[in-house]
Image (cartoon, rainbow, N blue to C red):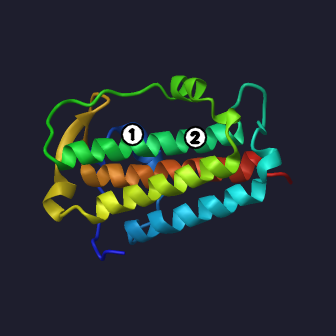
Amino acid sequence: MSHLVIPRPASGEYASYYATYLDAVPNGDLLRLLEEQGAEMLDLLRAFGEARGGHRYAPGKWSVKEVVGHVTDTERIFACRALRIARADTTPIPGFEQNGYVAAAGFDRRSLADLAEEFADVRKATLKLFTGLDAPALQRAGVASGHGVTVRAMAWIIAGHEQHHAQILRERYLPE
């Protein structure tokens, strides 16, 4: 793992609605945290087992498989935003409708093990992306979903988003 430091972004480097994600991410080595999160997510998914992959904690809520698919899709999208901005692409990047993505994906037709493997592959690619960036690239800013955002903020948002959903899986989906 690279010793690159990705500083915590200032509040003006991302849309205010991401603050809850960033506030949940502890200070420290973000790249190490992203790596640890990946391993912890895989451990968490193993705790569910294949039989509980379709579990929903309430009617109309996403299944475990859909949550994993959502986290993976969102990480891909956020990493793509970071890549485009890091490469000095000034084109505004549109948002996406997360519920539409989940509905169209058919995650419940796949095995939980397959979805977990895909998450692990995406997280590995995310880590490679961020370890390959230099300080100027991390500071570049662009527009995504109509709001200004820096590359380093995208890295922290990815960590916060995964952490948010992992916590929901632990609190609402795991059997007592």
Task: Kindly identify the residue that appears in the image at 61 percent across and 59 percent down.
Answer: 41
Does residue 24 appear in this view?
Answer: no
- Percent from the top left, x then y, of residue 124? 44, 60
| Left or right, 24 with reference to 146 | right
Q: Which residue is mark 1?
A: 77
| Left or right, 37 with reference to 43 | left
Q: Secondary structure at mark 1?
A: helix
Quick one: 104 or 158, which is closer to the camera?
104
Task: Kindly identify the residue that appears in the image at 28 percent across and 28 percent down.
Answer: 146
Neighbour class for label 1 at 10 Å: few (<14), some, many (≥20)?
some
**Distance from Cα at disc 1 to Cα at disc 2:** 12 Å
Viewport quadrant of the N terminus: bottom left
Please tell me in which quadrant of the rendered image residue 53 appears. top right
CB-based contact (under 8 Å), mark 1 and mark 2: no
Task: Kindly identify the residue that appears in the image at 76 percent across and 46 percent down.
Answer: 173
Q: Is residue 105 above or below residue 154?
A: above
Neighbour class for label 2 at 10 Å: few (<14), some, many (≥20)?
many
Q: Tell me which label, 1 or 2, sits earlier in the chain.
A: 2
- Percent from the top left, x then y, of residue 23? 45, 54
| Left or right, 6 with reference to 42 | left
Quick one: 60 or 88, which is closer to the camera?
88
Task: Kindly identify the residue that appears in the image at 40 percent across and 49 percent down.
Answer: 157
Going by the numbered disc 1, the residue's amino acid type is Ile
- Percent from the top left, x then y, of residue 96? 41, 27
Q: Which residue is mark 2?
A: 69
Going by the numbered disc 2, the residue's amino acid type is Gly
Please tell me in which quadrant of the rendered image residue 59 appears. top right
Quick one: 68 or 171, which is closer to the camera?
68
- Percent from the top left, x then y, of residue 131? 29, 65
